[in-house]
């Protein structure tokens, strides 16, 4: 490890590696750059130049950057007005490097104490952010500023503790200790390439690529209204122990995870039927778009396990601007260039369902026999489509509704869709992993590394 600028007494340092961090370096890979931004000590001044140097060094050397943040990150204090004898127009020093790095190297940020203001902005302007339960808090402004400015008396944990900010999507992972935070950092980096100019690192296979899972044949209930455990499907499909879910407490009906197929890192999208039936929310749309950006930036092929009943509806959904934010997620799907594989597990309905892949280019698409799709589910859609007819039926409406439902059910089979070649294949669910491991080798052969222009925090 070589520390830069040690003679300059400041609270930011930039180095290639410390003894504590040595154990976190993935084997046979260039070590990441580390940037520490601890809190101020009395009489100490934050040195932005060292922070900027670390950002520039990592970006130009094309190595991952890990930010260790504790405090404001140099956002300044009103005490400085007397020292300077003037005020200043705010700006964020080196922010061009911070933003540029999003499109060129993996950036992992760790909150290792209370983090506010510019420090919080640096934390979230990353690809993956991590905090430590009970030790870290993240907020725009701390409790004293909130009370003075808003008249709201609140503690640090309530304002910016792990429960609050993980549910808000401010951080992606919550660790139980500093050591676990470093272990998570290493694990995240193991899925990502050194830079956007390279492909993700393929690990030695630790699982049989042809492994089947008989349990998958019965995991989806025949009753379409009954939920099931989507995460169990992930466990049975991807390399054993390789699934790392990001943002689990944020927008919980949408699942985003990193995983491996025959040692190859992939980005995984799925829905959780246990939450809103797996429906896409406004927050879930934001989560989806950001995750696709991550996959696109670092050339991770996307595997989408699809059970999408559509956008969550109602007054709360409209107030949240669900359709606008959902359309942005759909745009992210179509703007992506990485290979896609979509497994239609159960429902695929409406505009949200249409976002299961970019339809303008090739992608592997297979369905399970439990597949059920259309513009609207028969349940609910029937009443809308035949509203006038049912109203005119009077006392016979219930009987007529049952007759119509029976006719529609007769053509609902996914095999009819496959016979019309509107879905490419229907597979035995137990064979899902072999189908995907075959695909992932072709997907990696087609990767086109290089920086993208649409990366956002």
Image: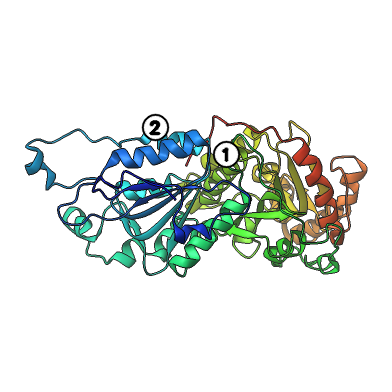
In-front residue for pair 170/259: 259
Query: Closer to us: mark 1 or mark 2?
Result: 1
Residue 335 image label: none
Residue 195 image label: 1
The x, y position of residue 161, in whole percent, is 37, 64
SS at badge 1: loop
In-front residue for pair 398/300: 300
Q: Is residue 246 visible?
A: no
SS at badge 2: helix
What residue is drawn where x is 48% and y is 44%? 321
What residue is drawn where x is 26% and y is 53%? 141
What residue is drawn where x is 29% and y is 65%? 156
47 is higher (above) or lower (below) than 18: above
The x, y position of residue 25, in whole percent, is 55, 55
The x, y position of residue 153, in whole percent, is 22, 64
In-front residue for pair 412/418: 418
What residue is drawn where x is 46% and y is 52%? 17
User: Pointer 2: residues within 10 angstroms few (<14), some, or many (20+)?
Assistant: few
Task: Describe residue 177's horizontal placement relative to residue 69 as left or right.
Answer: right
Q: Earlier in the sequence, mark 1 or mark 2?
A: 2
Residue that label 2 marks: 96
Task: Describe residue 92's horizontal placement relative to residue 436 as left or right.
Answer: left
Q: Is residue 337 visible?
A: yes
The x, y position of residue 325, in whole percent, is 52, 42
In-front residue for pair 73/246: 73
Distance from Cα at disc 1 to Cα at disc 2: 18 Å
User: Pointer 1: residues within 10 angstroms few (<14), some, or many (20+)?
Assistant: many
């Amino acid at each position: 490890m070589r520390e830069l600028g040690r003679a300059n007494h400041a609270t930011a340092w930039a180095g290639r590696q410390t003894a504590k961090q040595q154990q976190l370096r993935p084997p046979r890979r260039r070590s990441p750059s580390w940037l520490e931004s601890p809190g101020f000590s009395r009489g100490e001044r934050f040195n932005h130049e060292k922070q900027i140097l670390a950002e520039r060094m990592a970006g130009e050397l094309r190595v991952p950057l890990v930010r260790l943040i504790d405090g404001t990150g140099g956002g300044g204090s009103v005490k400085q007005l007397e020292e300077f004898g003037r005020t200043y127009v705010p700006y964020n020093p080196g922010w061009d490097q911070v933003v540029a790095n999003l499109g060129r190297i993996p950036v992992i940020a760790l909150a290792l104490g209370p983090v506010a203001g510019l420090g919080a902005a640096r934390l979230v302007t990353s690809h993956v952010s991590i905090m430590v339960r009970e030790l870290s808090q993240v907020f725009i402004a701390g409790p004293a500023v909130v009370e003075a400015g808003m008249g709201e008396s609140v503690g640090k944990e309530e304002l910016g503790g792990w429960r609050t900010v993980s549910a808000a999507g401010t951080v992606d992972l919550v660790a139980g200790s500093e050591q676990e935070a470093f272990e998570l950092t290493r694990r995240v980096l193991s899925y990502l390439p050194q830079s956007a100019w390279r492909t993700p690192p393929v690990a030695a296979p630790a699982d049989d690529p042809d492994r089947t899972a008989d349990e998958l044949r019965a995991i989806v209930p025949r009753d379409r209204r009954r939920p099931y455990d989507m995460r169990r499907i992930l466990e049975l499909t991807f390399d054993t122990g390789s699934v790392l879910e990001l943002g689990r407490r944020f927008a919980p009906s949408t699942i985003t995870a990193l995983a491996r197929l025959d040692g190859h890192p992939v980005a995984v999208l799925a829905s959780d039927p246990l939450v809103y039936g797996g429906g896409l929310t406004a927050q879930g749309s934001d989560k989806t778009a950001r995750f696709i950006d991550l996959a696109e930036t670092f050339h991770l092929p996307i595997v989408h396990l699809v059970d999408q009943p559509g956008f969550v509806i109602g007054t709360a959904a409209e107030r949240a601007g669900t359709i606008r934010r959902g359309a942005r997620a759909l745009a992210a799907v179509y703007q992506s260039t990485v290979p896609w594989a979509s497994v239609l597990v159960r429902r695929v309905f409406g505009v949200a369902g249409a976002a299961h892949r970019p339809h303008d280019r090739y992608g592997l698409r297979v369905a399970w026999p439990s597949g059920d799709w259309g513009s609207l589910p028969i349940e609910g859609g029937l009443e809308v489509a035949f509203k006038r007819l049912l109203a005119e039926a009077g006392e016979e409406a219930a009987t007529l509704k049952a007759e119509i439902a029976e006719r529609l059910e007769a053509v609902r089979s996914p095999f009819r869709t496959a016979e019309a070649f509107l879905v490419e294949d229907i597979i035995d669910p137990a064979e899902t992993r072999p189908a995907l491991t075959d695909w992932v080798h072709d997907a990696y052969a087609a990767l086109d590394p290089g920086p993208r222009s649409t990366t956002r925090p």
